Image (cartoon, coloured by chain):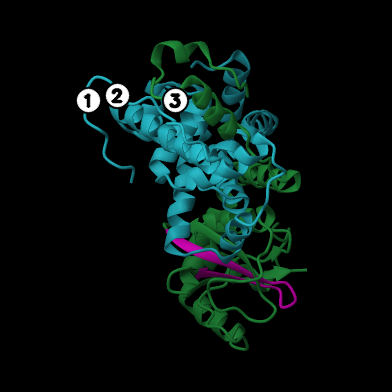
Chain colours: A green, B cyan
Amino acid sequence: MSDQPTPRDAVDDVPSLDPALRERVRTALRDVPPQDPERAQASLDAALEGLSHHQRPRRAWLVVAAAGIVGVLGVAVLGGRQNSGSDTDLDMVATPMTVDGSSSASPPAADEARLAESALTSETILDEFRLSIIGAAPIEQAQCPITAEERSYGLRRWDSRDVELLVDVSAGLLRLVDATTCEVLIVAPLTP
Amino acid sequence: MTSTPLEADLIAAARRGDREATDRLLRLHQPMIWAICRRIVGDDHTAADAAQEAMISVVKHVGRFDGRSSVRTWIYRVATNAALDELRRRRRRPDPVADEVIASRSGVTSGGANVVDDRLLIDEALAQLSPEFRAAVVLRDLADLDYAEISDVLGLPPGTVRSRIARGRRALADHLGNAQGNPEPTVRRPTDGSPAEPPLP
């Protein structure tokens, strides 16, 4: 970034300031504190990770989704029962994922039905969860109520609403809550 | 501003799903994405989130780039929108981490050098502008876009862009001058009898 005025300035700039002050403002604006290199790399990785998700074959998801249509109501009940020991209201179960955000390579057959349900909710769930986990450091204080073991990964825009991502590594659970109402939208088990 | 041959090659390859090209394209523009977000939102924590959202958005929507603007202008637009969106989001639900960062920043003392003073003061000065004014000044004086490009990025008539930049700069200059006890007027006052502009939002 050059501190010198560009040639364009001569023809289209707004002549409202003393040139010395104008230059001082410009210099100060350009003197941006550098981004933390680790966070910059994490953001880059998160964006590129999204690229690989967008390009992955979707046929498998369609097959799983079709298979899940028949049993989806029963699956919803099953999912609720499986999570009934938690201190939160668990509405849905999404695809198992590792702590670093990658999905488990071969989910157990017993999870196939739950996988089907998650495929029905939205494929973007995977993208958004994964990106948020990889790209953001946890913050101690969450907006919505959390358990003692949970950490917030901050607010994200998802499915046209503001959501907060909460992760409990020890329990292997990830919760996505509505940032406005704190309603639990999604719960995803994390695989170690 | 036109795309450089390198940018044109990279975005063409990125649109075909070339991961390496996408990586290079993002790395090429990452410093400016960060700078735009940092200047518009005003703190590192929020800017990091905005910059990340911007890069994710670039990757997601690279297929929609139609070449009507330069690659750079398109990416800066994405960054500007990500920063403004992040600000709106934080306004609805204040972030304790970001607030702590902002609060701690006000207690920082400078080493006395002008440039260090200005680095601190410019954040304060920018914070006094509305985000829309901030974005216009940042796109002009930091990102070097011309008025037509800024008009396109912000979706505003060129006259409104010029006015916002002029008034934004004036406010920044006033803040920098006043903060150092400069009693001299910091702007050229109109000599043609034109009416004074209304106060900044």
User: Does the image show residue B79?
Assistant: no
- The image shows residue A31, relative to residue B125, as above or below, that is above
Q: Earlier in the sequence, mark 2 or mark 3?
A: 3
Q: Quadrant of residue A15?
A: top left
| Main SS category, magenta section | strand
Q: Secondary structure at mark 3?
A: loop
> What's the CA distance linking mark 2 and mark 3?
42 Å
* Residue A168 painted magenta: yes
* Residue A13 painted magenta: no
Do discs 2 and 3 belong to a common subunit? Answer: yes
What is the span of residues highlighted in magenta in the rendered image? Answer: A161-177
Mark 2, residue position: B190
Amino acid type at image mark 2: Pro
- Residue drawn at x 56%, y 28% is A24
User: Is B47 or B167 nearer to us in this picture?
Assistant: B167
User: Is B182 or B51 nearer to us in this picture?
Assistant: B182
Task: Identify the chain of the residue marked 1, using the numbered disc in the image.
Answer: B
Q: Secondary structure at mark 2?
A: loop
Amino acid type at image mark 3: Asp
- Count of number-bearing discs: 3
Q: Are marks 1 and 3 in contact (CB under 8 Å)?
A: no
Q: Earlier in the sequence, mark 1 or mark 3?
A: 3
User: Is B17 or B120 nearer to us in this picture?
Assistant: B120
- Residue drawn at x 62%, y 21% is A2
- The image shows residue B37, relative to residue A63, as above or below, that is above
Q: Are marks 2 and 1 in contact (CB under 8 Å)?
A: yes
Task: Identify the chain of the residue marked 3, using the numbered disc in the image.
Answer: B
Mark 3, residue position: B66
Mark 1, residue position: B194
The location of residue A51, given as percent across then percent down, is: 62, 41
> What's the CA distance linking mark 2 and mark 1?
6 Å
Do discs 2 and 1 belong to a common subunit? Answer: yes
